[in-house]
Image: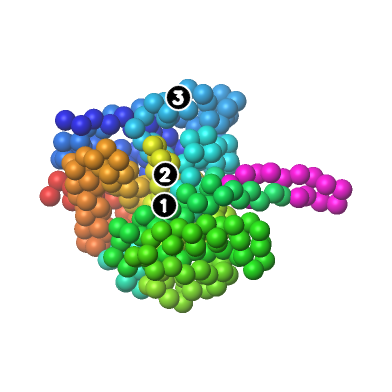
């Protein structure tokens, strides 16, 4: 039986609550599918910083490096020292954020189904900020290599989708050199994938069109900060942050995490929605299935996705989706669907 070592970072705030839920759900997936998952904690975040003086201790980094994949809850104020650092250290250059309408979840339209492919390692998020005489200068890093590989990743993803459409989102009319480089890389990739239809859109227009006609998007490829902002908007279009999953992909390793943060306003109340992290776990199984050519893993991912969707469609919802279930009860509903 295939066995995978999964490093697990609980994170802070609701991170602990939703990670516990995801592990319970994955335990059930594992028994039903015959995919063996061996979990090892990789503590990091605000609480770890307070306890050890380091937000991402070397020991946790070693556990993550030694695993097949990492499932991560959100961290609080130390996000830059944890996930931004992990993305750079492990070269997880593609942040994949799907936005899909789910039956039973209130959303703008029932036919939304697109994916944001966000460059994950550079841009203004490199944190290169310098004090100068009259304020601060921030440097936006854009390299040919990063633009080329994120563009390629987006087109490869589009090839596996029905609509096969990529739109490159940037602001090349103002940031002529940095966004200009990104735009050229996307055009070059487009020439290599003639089966995919390609267009470009300025980020302000994209923000508007996501509200106006979200169903018209298929794959959006964009730079780091624009992707961060647009993906929160995208999450809201299909029901909110509580159900939004994401993957940080490199060529050989990946970290899966919900889009939401540590949600201090609801932390400890036991009402955080575990669907975002559960769908992230689903993406993890899909990725393991593809990268290890393990059909059982792919099937386990499909079974998990179907169980989550059935549970929600039957009315199992936490308060963020208008329901009244606790995290624990929502978890039980998903597990019950998995056993059905
Ligand atoms: P960050 O800057 O780390 O992203 P934030 O406070 O801006 O943090 P979140 O922590 O994601 O963003 O919280 C934004 C809103 O979404 C809050 O009202 C929070 O309660 C809600 N929220 C986030 N995650 C969940 C969840 N899993 N279930 C229910 N509501 C959530």
Q: Identify the secondary structure beneath mark 2.
A: strand
Q: Left or right: 339 with respect to 101? A: left
The mark closer to the camera, 3 or 1, is 1
Q: Estimate the x, y position of residue 53 in percent, counting from the top left.
A: 60, 25
Determine if the magenta segment contains residue 141: no
Q: Which span is picked out in magenta?
A: 122-137
The quarter in which the N terminus is drawn is top left
- The answer to whether residue 299 of the structure is visible from this angle is yes
Q: Left or right: 319 with respect to 263? A: left
Asked whether 242 or 332 is in front, the reply is: 242
Q: Left or right: 271 with respect to 160? A: right
- For marks 2 and 1, give the CA distance: 10 Å
Q: Residue at x 42, y 30 (%)?
A: 64
Residue bearing the label numbered 2: 249
Q: Identify the secondary structure beneath mark 1.
A: helix
Image quadrant in which you'd find residue 285: top left
The mark closer to the camera, 2 or 1, is 1
Q: Residue at x 66, y 58 (%)?
A: 177
Q: Identify the secondary structure beneath mark 3.
A: helix
Residue bearing the label numbered 3: 62
Q: Left or right: 120 with respect to 37? A: right
- For marks 3 and 2, give the CA distance: 18 Å
Q: Earlier in the sequence, mark 2 or mark 1?
A: 1
Q: Earlier in the sequence, mark 3 or mark 2?
A: 3
Disc 1 packing (10 Å; few <14; some 14–19; many ≥20): many
Q: Earlier in the sequence, mark 3 or mark 1?
A: 3
Residue bearing the label numbered 1: 153
Q: Are marks 2 and 1 in contact (CB under 8 Å)?
A: yes
The mark closer to the camera, 3 or 2, is 2
């Amino acid at each position: 039986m295939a066995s995978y070592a999964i490093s697990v970072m609980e994170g802070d705030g609701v991170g602990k609550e939703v990670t516990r839920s995801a592990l319970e759900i994955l335990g059930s997936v594992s028994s039903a599918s015959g995919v063996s998952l061996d979990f090892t904690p990789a503590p990091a975040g605000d609480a770890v910083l307070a306890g050890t003086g380091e937000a991402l201790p070397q020991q946790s980094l070693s556990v993550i490096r030694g695993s097949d994949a990492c499932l991560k809850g959100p961290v609080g104020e130390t996000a830059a020292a944890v996930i931004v650092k992990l993305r750079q250290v492990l070269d997880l250059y593609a942040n994949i954020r799907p936005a899909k309408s789910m039956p039973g979840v209130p959303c703008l339209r029932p036919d939304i189904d697109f994916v944001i492919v966000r460059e994950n390692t550079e841009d203004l998020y490199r944190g290169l900020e310098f004090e100068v005489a009259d304020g601060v200068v921030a440097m936006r890093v854009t390299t040919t290599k990063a633009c080329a590989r994120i563009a390629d990743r987006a087109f490869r993803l589009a090839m596996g989708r029905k609509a096969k459409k990529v739109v490159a989102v940037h602001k090349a009319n103002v940031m002529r050199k940095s966004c200009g480089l990104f735009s050229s890389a996307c055009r070059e990739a487009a020439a290599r994938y003639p089966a995919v239809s390609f267009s470009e859109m300025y980020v302000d227009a994209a923000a508007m069109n996501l509200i106006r006609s979200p169903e018209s998007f298929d794959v959006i490829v964009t730079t780091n900060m624009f992707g961060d902002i647009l993906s929160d908007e995208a999450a809201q279009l299909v029901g909110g942050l509580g159900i939004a999953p994401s993957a940080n992909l490199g060529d050989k390793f990946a970290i899966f995490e919900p889009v939401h943060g540590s949600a201090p306003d609801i932390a400890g109340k036991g009402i955080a929605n575990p669907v975002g992290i559960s769908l992230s776990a689903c993406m993890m199984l899909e990725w393991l299935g593809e990268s290890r050519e393990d059909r059982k893993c792919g099937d386990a991912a499909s079974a998990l996705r179907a169980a989550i969707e059935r549970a929600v469609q039957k009315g199992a919802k936490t308060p963020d989706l208008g329901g009244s279930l606790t995290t624990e009860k929502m978890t039980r509903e998903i597990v019950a669907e998995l056993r059905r």
